[in-house]
Image (cartoon, grey):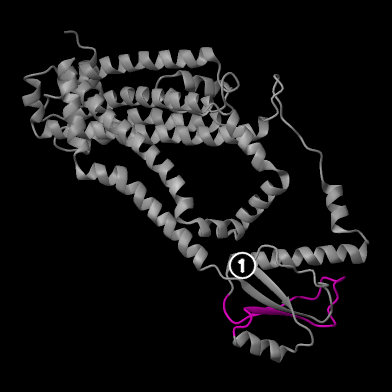
Amino acid sequence: MNKILLIAKREFLTRVQKKTFLLTTIGLPLLIFGLYALIIFFTVKNAKDFKIAVADQANIFKGALKDKDGEIIFSFVNNTSKDSLDKQLKSSKYDAYILVPSSFNIAENKDSLHIVSAKSVGFLTQEKIERRINKVLEENKLLLGLNVSKDKLDSLQHTNEIIFASVTGDTKGSEKSQVSYIVGLISGFLIYIILFIYGTMVMRGVMEEKTNRIAEVIISSVKPFQLMMGKILGIGSVGLIQFLIWIVLVMGLNILLPLIFPDLLHQMQSQPIQPGMVAATNALQNSGATNHLSAALSGVNIPLILGCFVFYFLGGYFLYASLFAAVGSTVNEDPQDAQSLVLPITMPIIFAMVIMMQAVNEPNSPLAIFGSLFPLTSPIVMMARIAHGVPDGVTVLQLVLSMVFLVVGFIATTWFAGKIYRTGILMYGKKVTWKEIMKWAFRKG
């Protein structure tokens, strides 16, 4: 055990003391934060109101184009000719103008409205202008043709609220499902990335030591199994420390962002950039979904999710890292040989992602239950199910069985990989196939 810890300490310190570790662990989040802050700064600072002069000679708008979002400003001008509007446009008093002739008939859809601008108008700005104008025209047509106000029409189209509830009387079903879907998706995807990144890191570390003949020196002092376990524990500790640092940095930067850019964030909230964001914000404000979302977040068991995330992160890493280490021990001077050998290991990870996409939406489906119990897929799939809570998303029995199976799977893969590692780490000058690897794994003695 002491030798395993010594090797793990060496692997840990070797990687932590490198400049690349500091750059990827601390520099990368700071760089992303800096770029994000610059995007916010330039987006808000460069935001400019688009002013449109409206010469409504036919009185089709009836002065109803009011400034609602602050981005598009309509100004009604009276007794103004086209030449006068062109001059104001050239002098940059307005960005565009609408001239509605007195012959314009709102009841018929034959006439067209022309929005004249001196410069090119962006696609999103065009969408906002059309949406504002069409809304007013629709309301005026209803009043003219049917004598029905827009409010009355909206009340007819309004449907009764539909609430999803559980047997226990919990009425947070809809909002909680949305939050659980997002949390499960993010958690499963993070596990997926971690398994690939750190599993490959273990494989490359083994390959480097084998090709540099360092393993021959180390094997003279320790057993091959101890060397493999030491490398897995050392690199796994680096990954865990790196992940914890990222969590602290992200939480810290989220706190600092409103303090550094208080005015800019306020402007962004009052002046949304994209139409989809405007619609989503208005819908949340009108329906009171913000309060429901906060309640749904309070209903998610964060400590359980974090605890399971650490367990499945470590269990999944140890399981796959031992397999990646076994593949690394069989590769010789040509790293391309590892590609064909890695495919059977990566396929269950990809398969787990496919199951996870269903599990986040249907956590109790047979495929989701199987994926959360099978050790090769459970680290990813179970995170998608656990986000829905216990026992709604996963029962206590299934969670316990999944953890037990993962531990048993780790022990089995470690034994399997250790047998391969013992022979492969000292095998040189021969291209290894899976058939020969299986002989190494089940060889007695």
Instruction: Name the residue: 70% across, 91% down.
Output: 83
Q: Is residue 377 visible?
A: no
Q: Residues within 10 Å of mark 1 (few under 14, many from 20)?
A: some
* Residue in the foreground of this view, choosing between 197 and 428: 197
Magenta residues, start to end? 92-120
Instruction: Name the residue: 47% across, 56% down.
Output: 261
Majority secondary structure of the magenta segment? loop
x, y percentage for residue 346?
35, 31
Q: Is residue 42 above or below residue 407?
A: below
Instruction: Name the residue: 62% across, 78% down.
Output: 95
Asked whether residue 111 is drawn in magenta, I would say: yes
Picture quarter with the N terminus: top left
Query: Residue reaching furthest right?
Result: 147
Asked whether residue 37 is drawn in magenta, I would say: no
Q: Is residue 381 above or below residue 126?
A: above
* Residue in the foreground of this view, choosing between 144 and 36: 36
x, y percentage for residue 352?
45, 29
x, y percentage for residue 439?
22, 16
Q: Is residue 251 left or right of residue 387?
A: left
Q: Tag 1, which secondary structure?
A: helix
Name the kind of residue labelled 1 in the image: Thr
- Toward which corner of the image does residue 142 lie, by quadrant? bottom right
Query: Residue reaching furthest top?
Result: 445
Residue bearing mark 1: 125
- Toward which corner of the image does residue 133 lie, by quadrant? bottom right
x, y percentage for residue 82?
72, 88
Q: Is residue 222 above or below residue 356?
A: above
* Residue in the foreground of this view, choosing between 374 and 385: 385
Instruction: Name the residue: 58% across, 33% down.
Output: 297
Picture quarter with the C terminus: top left
